[in-house]
Image (cartoon, rainbow, N blue to C red):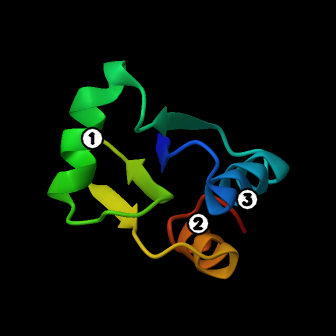
Amino acid sequence: MIEVYTLPDCSHCQEAKDYLKEKGISFLEINLKKKENREARIFWRSLGIYKVPVIVLKTDDKISVLKDYSKEKLEEWLKRHGEIQ
């Protein structure tokens, strides 16, 4: 499952979400401003990252994190993890 950690009015967050939708990749958006996402904020901070978007791929046995977003890096990361060709 892919999770996209976002903040409102973040243009890079919107770009990342649009790209994933364009590629037909399902994801869960986690808005870090929402009160109910407290545990997600704790996880996000534990990564030592204080910017968004942060994109996380969780599988049964590991977690992979794209910390430094650009559309090109996202595409490369998705290919590396077999999410796109």
| C-alpha gap between disc 1 and disc 3 | 21 Å
- Position in image of residue 12 (x %, y %): 65, 63
- Position in image of residue 83 (x %, y %): 61, 58
Residue at horizontal 72 percent and vertical 68 percent from the top: 85
Nearer mark to the viewer, of 1 and 2: 1
Residue at horizontal 67 percent and vertical 80 percent from the top: 72
Image height of 57 relative to 78, above or below: above
- Position in image of residue 42 (x %, y %): 18, 42
Mark 1: give few (<14), some (14-19) or many (20+) Cα within 10 Å.
some
Q: Would residue 61 be visible to someone looking at this image?
A: no
Please state which amino acid type lies under the numbered disc 3: Glu
Residue assigned mark 2? 78
Q: Identify the secondary structure beneath mark 3.
A: helix
Residue assigned mark 3? 15
Mark 2: give few (<14), some (14-19) or many (20+) Cα within 10 Å.
some
- Position in image of residue 35 (x %, y %): 34, 22
